[in-house]
Image: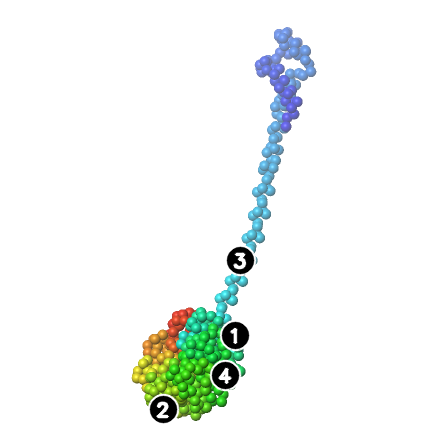
C-alpha cells in the first residue's frame, strides 16, 4: 500500500513541472552558467537547491513504480484461492448413520407374526363326550360335565337365558355335573351325575317336569326324580329310565305317550305301566318305545302310521310288544317311524314311510317291522324327522330317507329309499339326528354336522346348509 504522505508529495511535484515541456526538462536544458540561458530559468535553480530536478524526476519514477501496488497479489492470495474448508465438508458428505439404518431394514418381528396367521385354537375342535340333535337345535356334553347348545332358541331351548338363536355352541347357564343331554322339539333336558334331571325351554304340556306349564330360559329341576340312568326328550314329552329298569315319563299325554294307561296331562314324572326291565328308551312325536333287557321292544302312544309296530293303527295308552322283533341291541324312534338294530347286524323298521325312511326301497308305510335293504354289520341306529342313520361296526356311517336339506350327507339333496354312505367322516363313535340335520361325534372327540342350518344348528358359525359334514366350531 502507498503511504498517503508520499502520494501528496508526488502530486505537488507533478503540478510544478506541468508547464514545462518534457523536452526542456531533459535533452534541451542548457548547462548552468551558459550565457545563452534565459534568465527566467536561473531563478528557480538558484532559489531552490534542496531538490534538484534530476532527483525529483528520479523520485517520481520511483514513486510510480511503487512496489506495494504492483505486489497486490498478496490480497488476491488471501483466503480467496485457499478456501478448502468450504470445498471439503466431509461431515456433510459422510453421514453413515443415515445410510446404514439396519434396525429399520431388519424388522423380522413384523414379518413373522405366527399367532395371527395360525389361528388353530379357534378351529381346533373341542372334545365332545356326547351329543343330541333335535328339531332345529343341538346340544353337546363336554368331558367336564358342561353342556353347550346351539341353533334355534325361540323358547329358550338353548338354556343361555335368552331367546336368541346361536350359530356356535353357547354354555347352558348354571348347569354343572351333567352326565347326559337330550334335545326335544323346543326344549332340552340333562341328566345329572347325581341321578336327578334338569330341563329348560318350552313347557306348554308340562314337558319340563317341574309341575308347571310356564317355560324357562335356564335349567329347572325335574320334580321328584332320582336314580336316573337315562333321560330322553321327545317332541312334547320326556322320559327317564331308572337304574332299576323302571321308566317314568312326563308331558304331553293326549294320545297315551306317557304310558300310564291314561290320557291325562302329566307335568311331573309318572311311572309307565307294566315295564320293569327297560334297557333303553327313545321318543318320537307322540309315540314312545323301550328296548327291554331281553332284546324285545315295546311301544305306546300315537299309532296313526303303524309306528307302535303291533300290526294295527290303534292308539295305545300303555306298552305293547312290537311284532316279531327279537335280539334288539339298539333302538331309534323318529317323527312317526321307528327302527331297531339286531344282534345279527341287520336293521328293521316300521311306521311312516313317505320319504323312504324305512329303507326297504318303497314309500309304503308299515305297521310291522321290515328289513332295511342291503344293510349288514350295523352297530347302532338313530332316527330324525324323516331319515335314519346306521353306525357300522367298522365305524362308517350310512343314512337313508328324506334329504331335502342334505341331511343324509352324501353331497346331494335327493331322497334315498335305501342306505347311502356318508363319505369322508373318519371313525364315528356316535350319531344323532334332528328334524333335517345330522351330527356325528368321532372317536377323536371332534363333532361334525350337516343338513339344514337355518338357525345355526350345525354349529359352524353360519346359517348355510351343508350337504357334507362340517366341523362344529366351539
The answer to whether residue 470 is above or below residue 23 is below
Q: Position of residue 169 (x, y in %)?
A: 47, 73
Which of marks 2 and 1 precedes in the sequence? 1
Res 467 → quadrant = bottom left
Position of 316 relative to 83 (above/below): below
Residue bearing the label numbered 2: 323
Indicate the quadrant where residue 74 lies.
Answer: top right
- Which of labels 3 and 2 is toward the front? 2
Report whether residue 399 is seen.
no
**SS at circle 4:** loop
Label 2 crowd bin: few (<14), some (14–19), many (20+), radius 10 Å: some
Residue at image position (35%, 85%) is 303
Q: Which residue bears the numbered disc 4?
A: 225
Q: Position of residue 335 (x, y in %)?
A: 37, 81
Q: Categorize mark 3 by other alpha carbons within 10 Å: few (<14), some (14-19), many (20+).
A: few
- Report the mark closest to the observer, 4 or 3: 4
- Residue at (43% x, 73% y) in the render: 155
Mark 1, residue position: 174
Towards the viewer: 88 or 267:
267
Q: Viewer-nearest of labels 4 and 2?
A: 4
Q: Dot 3 corresponds to which residue?
A: 105
Amino acid at each position: 500500500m502507498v503511504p498517503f504522505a508520499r502520494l501528496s508529495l508526488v502530486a505537488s511535484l507533478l503540478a510544478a513541472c506541468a508547464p514545462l515541456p518534457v523536452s526542456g526538462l531533459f535533452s534541451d536544458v542548457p548547462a548552468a552558467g551558459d550565457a545563452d540561458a534565459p534568465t527566467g530559468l536561473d531563478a528557480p535553480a538558484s532559489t531552490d537547491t534542496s531538490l534538484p530536478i534530476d532527483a525529483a524526476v528520479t523520485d517520481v519514477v520511483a514513486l510510480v513504480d511503487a512496489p506495494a501496488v504492483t505486489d497486490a497479489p498478496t490480497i488476491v492470495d488471501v483466503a480467496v484461492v485457499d478456501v478448502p474448508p468450504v470445498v471439503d465438508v466431509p461431515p456433510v458428505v459422510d453421514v453413515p448413520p443415515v445410510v446404514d439404518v439396519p434396525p429399520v431394514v431388519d424388522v423380522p418381528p413384523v414379518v413373522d407374526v405366527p399367532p395371527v396367521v395360525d389361528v388353530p385354537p379357534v378351529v381346533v375342535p373341542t372334545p365332545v363326550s356326547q351329543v343330541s340333535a333335535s328339531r332345529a337345535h343341538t346340544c353337546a356334553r363336554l368331558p367336564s360335565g358342561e353342556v353347550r347348545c346351539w341353533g334355534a332358541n325361540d323358547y329358550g331351548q338353548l338354556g343361555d337365558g335368552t331367546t336368541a338363536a346361536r350359530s356356535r355352541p353357547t354354555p347352558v347357564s348354571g348347569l354343572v355335573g351333567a352326565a347326559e343331554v337330550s334335545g326335544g322339539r323346543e326344549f332340552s333336558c340333562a341328566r345329572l351325575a347325581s341321578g336327578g334331571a334338569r330341563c329348560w325351554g318350552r313347557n306348554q304340556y308340562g314337558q319340563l317336569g317341574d309341575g308347571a306349564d310356564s317355560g324357562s330360559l335356564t335349567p329347572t329341576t325335574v320334580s321328584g326324580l332320582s336314580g336316573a340312568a337315562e333321560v330322553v326328550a321327545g317332541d312334547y314329552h320326556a322320559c327317564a329310565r331308572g337304574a332299576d329298569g323302571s321308566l317314568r315319563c312326563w308331558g304331553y299325554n293326549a294320545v297315551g305317550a306317557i304310558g300310564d294307561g291314561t290320557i291325562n296331562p302329566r307335568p311331573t314324572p309318572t311311572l309307565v305301566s307294566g315295564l320293569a326291565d327297560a334297557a333303553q328308551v327313545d321318543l318320537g312325536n307322540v309315540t314312545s318305545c323301550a328296548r327291554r333287557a331281553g332284546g324285545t321292544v315295546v311301544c305306546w302312544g300315537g299309532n296313526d302310521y303303524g309306528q307302535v309296530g303291533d300290526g294295527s293303527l290303534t292308539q295305545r295308552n300303555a306298552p305293547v310288544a312290537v311284532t316279531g322283533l327279537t335280539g334288539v341291541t339298539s333302538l331309534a324312534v323318529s317323527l312317526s317311524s321307528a327302527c331297531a338294530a339286531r344282534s345279527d347286524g341287520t336293521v328293521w323298521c316300521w311306521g311312516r314311510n313317505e320319504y323312504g325312511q324305512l329303507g326297504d326301497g318303497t314309500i309304503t308305510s308299515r305297521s310291522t317291522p321290515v328289513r332295511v335293504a342291503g344293510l349288514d354289520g350295523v352297530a347302532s341306529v338313530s332316527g330324525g324327522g324323516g331319515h335314519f342313520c346306521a353306525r357300522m361296526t367298522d365305524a362308517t356311517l350310512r343314512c337313508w330317507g328324506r334329504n331335502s336339506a342334505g341331511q343324509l350327507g352324501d353331497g346331494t339333496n335327493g331322497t334315498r329309499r335305501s342306505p347311502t354312505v356318508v363319505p369322508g367322516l373318519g371313525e364315528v363313535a356316535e350319531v344323532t339326528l334332528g328334524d333335517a340335520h345330522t351330527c356325528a361325534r368321532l372317536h377323536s372327540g371332534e363333532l361334525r354336522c350337516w343338513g339344514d342350518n337355518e338357525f345355526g344348528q350345525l354349529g359352524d358359525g353360519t346359517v348355510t346348509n351343508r350337504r357334507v359334514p362340517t366341523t362344529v366350531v366351539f
